[in-house]
Image: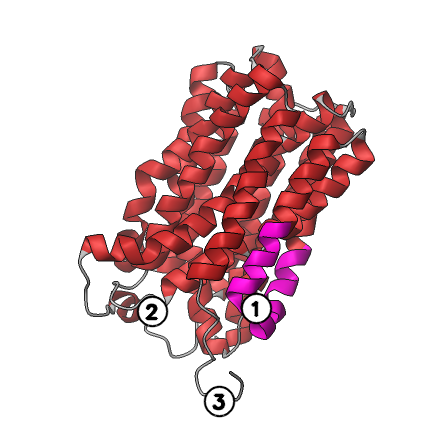
Amino acid sequence: MPASPARARLGISLQFLTNGALMGTLLPHYPQIKDGFGLSNSAYGLLVVAFALGSILTAAFSGRLVRRFGAMQVATAGTVVLAAMLAVAASSPWVWLLFLGLLLAGAVDPILDSGQNVHGLRVERVSGRSIINSLHAIWSLGAVVGGLVGAWTAGLGLDVGTVMVVSGIGWSGVALLAWWLTRLPGADEAATEREGHVLVRRRRGLLLVAPVALLAVCGTLVEEIGNSWAALYTRDALGAEPGVAGLAYVTAFAAQFVGRLLGDPLSDRFGRGPTAAGGGVLIALGALVVMVAPGVAVGLVGFVLLGLGCATLVPAAFAAAHEIPGLPFGTGIALVTWLMRSGFLLTSPLYGVIADGAGLRAGMVLPVVAGVAAVVISLHWVRPAPAREGASVTGP
């Protein structure tokens, strides 16, 4: 099959799908893991933060690795390592090894994430139209597919270690196929990745990136609640059975998938800032619905709103950071990847402390705050999506 933009888009889409599915398969098993080790809410919150802690340790170096080895090479190798570390964590009979496996999985995730986003934006440029929200929609679809498998296997009571070994082998194969498909026609990728803009001072670079990184933090905070707390909340606060509880995670990320499919046309029509601000409103509303939900059905409606609301925040932050002038190739995305991991790092421990002190419902105040913050940041600091190369601008 000859290299072409369509083939490259298929390949990068498969890479995003794989990344979403790997972690998505494990997350519905988190209540089972919590019960197996007899953890309190606070201890559980500290355990699952291992993934975010690993991400913080390595995210700042991801841009350098992308420039050195190539975006898709980094993404593919990182996917295989991620699959292996998740299998180690899931198979562990000891809490310390579970923590270590999640820590190492978290350490590789921002590196492969930078690689797939850098290559996705390259495919977007070659294709001549916006695709970044659609690629993140494919990631959400992967999370839904993985979540359905995870919820199904958790409901059957299958061993989580065996599930993650099989999942890791299968999705690693898909990642290798994605790598083969993503070559672009006539592109010297290594040369492109070595290209740099006029360098700016590191402090100024951080100041330029900080607002869009804060927007990404608002998105990842909501995603982390969906990742680590949705199933537990639905089981313990709303009284769902284990197999049904896992559907809260699936529901949130299915809604995120739909929101991201709509994200590109909405951003083109209204601009990135207003689109993300609308998402912030949905986040705050969804969190309030979940907080007061009398049962599973209403709670799932709230998780739908949370998923729709956070859909465009991270893609908007990545795209805006990639366009910041004066940063070396890939550095804007690397900095956002690094800074936004604080959303994952802080969310679960803070939610756990609130849950132990005031109950799981009270913890939903966190996404309410994130939603309000997203509205403020989006309307003040996120620039409109730029016109595509070669397009004329006829409106205001």
Where disc 1 sits, the SS reads helix
- Residue 175 position (above or below residue 46): below
Q: Residues within 10 Å of mark 2 (few under 14, many from 20)?
A: some
Q: State left or right for residue 321 relative to residue 394.
A: left
Q: Residues within 10 Å of mark 1 (few under 14, many from 20)?
A: many
| Residue 274 included in the magenta stretch of the image | yes
| Residue 333 included in the magenta stretch of the image | no
Q: Which residue sits at x=21%, y=52%? A: 203
Q: Which residues are magenta?
A: 258-281
Q: What is the three-letter code of the residue carrying label 3?
A: Ser
Q: Residues within 10 Å of mark 3 (few under 14, many from 20)?
A: few
Give the number of the mark in front: 2 or 1: 1
Contact check, label 2 and label 1, Cβ < 8 Å: no
Give the number of the mark in front: 3 or 2: 3
Give me the C-alpha separation between circle 3 and circle 2. 28 Å
The kind of secondary structure the magenta stretch mainly shows is helix
Q: Which mark is residue 267?
A: 1
Image x and y of residue 371, in percent: 56, 46
In the figure, residue 237 lies in which quadrant?
Answer: top right
Image x and y of residue 184, in percent: 43, 73
Q: What is the three-letter code of the residue carrying label 2?
A: Glu
Image x and y of residue 258, in percent: 68, 57
Quickly name the residue at label 3.
392
Give me the C-alpha separation between circle 1 and circle 3. 17 Å
Dot placed on the residue nearer the N-terminal end, 1 or 3: 1
Quickly name the residue at label 2.
189
